[in-house]
Image: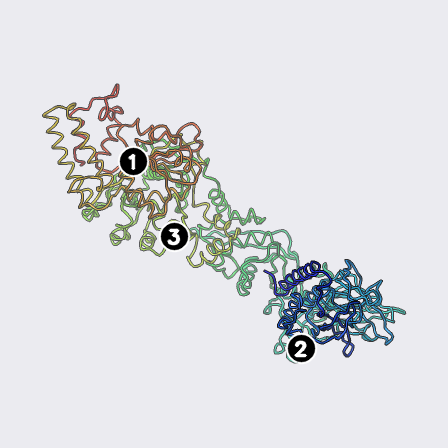
Amino acid sequence: MFSRVEADAADGAVDSWLERLDAAGAGPSSRAATQVRYVLTHREIYYVPRVEIDAFAATVLRDGTLSNLRPIDVLNMTKLAGSFVTPIDRTVGRLAGVSGVARPVLAAPTPPILGTLLDIAIETGRLHWKSGSNPPLKRNAIARGRLTWRTDPDGRQRPTLVDRPRAVFLPAKPVWYVDPATMEAGPVELGIAPELAAIAVSSPALTQRQAERSQIVWRRAVAPGGADAPASRTPAEFVDDDPIPVLRLDAARFAFAELRFAYGGREVGAADRDDAFQVAAGPSQKIWPRRRDAEDRARKRLIQAGFTPVEPDEAGNDPRLLRDAYRLGLEDDAGWARFVHVGLPRLRADGWRVEFGGSFGLEIVEPGDDWDARFVENENHWFDLDLGITIQGERVALLPILVEALRERGRLGRDARAEGEPLFARLPSGAYAVLPAERVNRLLATLVELFDTNGLTADGRLALTAAHVGVLDEIVRDGGIRWDGGIALRTLVERLNALPAGRTVTVPAEFQGTLRSYQHDGVAWLQMLREYGFGAVLADDMGLGKTVQLLAHAAIERAHDRLTAPILIVAPTSVVPNWRAEIARFTPHLRVLSLTGAERAERFEHIGDHDVVLTTYALLQRDADRLLPREWSLAVLDEAQAVKNPRSKGAQHVRRLRARQRIALTGTPIENHLDELWSIFAFAVPALLGERAAFARRFRTPIEKRNDLARRKALALRVRPFLLRRTKEAVEADLPPKSEIVARVELDGAQRDLYETIRLAMHKRVRDEVNRRGVERSRIVVLDALLKLRQVCCDPRLVKLPAARAAKGSAKLEALLDMLPDLLADGRRILLFSQFTSMLDLIKPELLRLGVKYVELRGATRDRVTPVARFQSGEIPLFLISLKAGGTGLNLTAADTVIHYDPWWNPAVVRQATDRAHRIGQEHPVFVYKLVTVGTVEERILEMQARKAALADGIFEDAAGAAPLDADAIDRLFAPFG
């Protein structure tokens, strides 16, 4: 956007061009008898220069001379009707209006307007210097000139140009000059900023005294651009340096610092008003201009160091506190020690002068390198920690010093010291010890939360529980502290902080399974924690066998007669069937009691007769009065993220469970924030992370809000002995190329009733058809019956029968929607297969509700390339595929997880679909999940496949070698579970 002045200048240039073009084309005879002429005047009023431009109407004689000059009202020039007023003259009139000069003369216009007026007026060829009788001024710009001063006969100095001693400056923007000797004028570049140049050339005519007075400011503001200063009779040397800050430390009513500034031999403060200081130097003098900006920087630096100016009411009547005095903090003696030890050397290095008054006394001592940790073991897994340092040959208790330092730090609102800054701790003698930053920071990061939840004993020791032993190795090893005594405790620390690999444990023969090496390590870890009375959080990645490790741990406990009370396992409702199946598979000798269903009240009295008791999170709350008072050998939370909200009823109930060992199983110990981790550990190892409010203050807030790496490291150190997490990538070498997981889902309510209704009807129809026509000729009827049962297992809405309309909800769909968020949160790339495209249509709205992005492939999909490319590139994490459309011909190695929502009866078809991900080019282990409803035809098929792998082939196709589908097999498929 152009300014008004710039726009007028542009219009003026065009008007001037048009005027000259018109005049040249019309010829001399058409010249107007009357013209507007401009007279440029430069005069002084009380020695202050003033620029005026007058407008006249003049008659132009044939010889070119002017006569009959008549003043013109410039502001009304745009209204003049005379033909002699040209467009460019009207532009001048418009500029007059911009200048706001309500008179016929454009007097002292602003620099930008003056510059524009001069540009326009000189282009007309009708601009005269001082009188219309003088010839018009000729434009001659000077690309580079230098400002200097001339002394006129009146003894005053006026600015002019070097090499043009009679030139007069015009304070325009840019600056103009007029040379009366040559009648030349134009802009001149002085090497100074345009605004500064306009001010510089507008100088009044200076007397000698005024010239000498102006030199200080001139040299600071203008001379760096290459302009000469006004001449001085006395030779003077200007000092182009900042003053030297002088900091004097002293004590009156309190310790304070006085800040002054040395200009040569003179010290000044804020109250001094002089702008410069003169220092005699032989026949000449030195002039030191005052640098208030440098003084302000020094004051600001002092304030940034924690100082505040002393207020008059604080100073009392002490004159030392009434001028340029600052105090540090609020009687913060440790802050003074820090400032003297760290701040003053930095100030001295930057040229500050530091002085000490006689009343300022502060002793700072350096401790030796011999720091030690002594441990006194008490009963019931408690011990006292005593840290000491050697100062001037004597041992001083370190913990009280650290506690006081932490309290002082909290009182002053400082959550952490600057990196690399030592801690200044007050000793009993009153002196201050300088504790090295690196060692202290490591100690504080480890001990800060312990100080918050555990007080010191009377003799300066820290009382801790055995749950805190995980931090001691960090204190001793990384803190460079000598361990003194506590051999048994040191052994425990070493065992807890060692990696689980390499520990040995013997699994009893009753355990019906083979543990992989990492699973063996996990069981040994659980056994070691049980030995010392600790709980555990087993947080292995999904699919790595947390259930198997827990059952092996339980088998060892039973083999050693330590199951004097049952094991309580609390799990989500959908997972309880899987626990029953896994216990039956790996530990069939354990007696299992399932406290689920409406009839569970009848089974409470039999709890003591079983080894394992299964319940759900929801039922634990309902049955709290029967389950919470009991003593359990083990209390196990499966999918422990279910109690991630510490305020929930479920979390509160599980924390009240009484057990000799508590174990939390979870693949996602942290989903959203650290409060979830605290909630899980509040169950598993209650004393480890302290109270929730203290945990939030010491860990959650610094880590989540400020990304405090030291706090994060301290938290990791705290939980490390009691949390074991292995990812599938970490144990990839020990995993099979493909892991298959059967996720069992239990039908209930209307869905279970619908299944039983259809099963009974279909079983009778199939049996009658087989009896009447035989197995082979009854194939279509059998397939239709199995189809309807499978549809009920997937979702009752798939069944096109009137009876299905009353059944609301699908247990399998709910189980899927529970799985997907956890898998996606773990970064899984998922293929979801279903034989029923109508089931995919029911799943998609639920995915939209959860905000899960997906692509889809089914038989009707024409463009198969785009969805595959989007999934393979990593853009989309979930691929919905109909079994028929995606069973072959696809390479989807970006996937590491396959879910079969309704596994096909033919295992070869399922393997083909799975191999879309599990094939050459796959770099990660593949996890295959099969969703199977408990007590349905789906589970029957799995049993039959386990006994006779070729049976499923015979159900649907005449594959070579397929086992025949006989009447007994059909009866078993449709038989009730019991």
Depth check: 719 or 349 in front?
Answer: 349
Q: Earlier in the sequence, mark 1 or mark 3?
A: 3
Q: Determine the residue located farthest toward the right in the rendered image.
A: 283
Point out residue 294 in the picture as x, y percentages from the top left corner. Answer: 71, 65
Residue 751 visible somewhere in the drawing: yes
In the picture, residue 38 is in which quadrant? Answer: bottom right
Point out residue 589 in the picture as x, y percentages from the top left corner. Answer: 27, 35
Q: CA distance from mark 2 to mark 1?
A: 93 Å
Residue 957 vertical placement versus 402 (above, below): above
Q: Which residue, given by chain and number where applicable, does mark 1 sit on?
A: 834
Quarter placement of the N terminus: bottom right
In the picture, residue 339 is in which quadrant? Answer: bottom right
Depth check: 978 or 913 in front?
Answer: 913
Q: Which residue, given by chain and number where applicable, does mark 3 sit on?
A: 679
Residue 583 visible somewhere in the drawing: no
Q: Which residue, given by chain and number where applicable, does mark 2 sit on?
A: 103
Q: Residues within 10 Å of mark 3 (few under 14, many from 20)?
A: many
Circles 2 and 1, Cβ within 8 Å, touching? The answer is: no
Label 3: element kind: helix
Q: Determine the residue located farthest toward the bottom in the rendered image.
A: 317
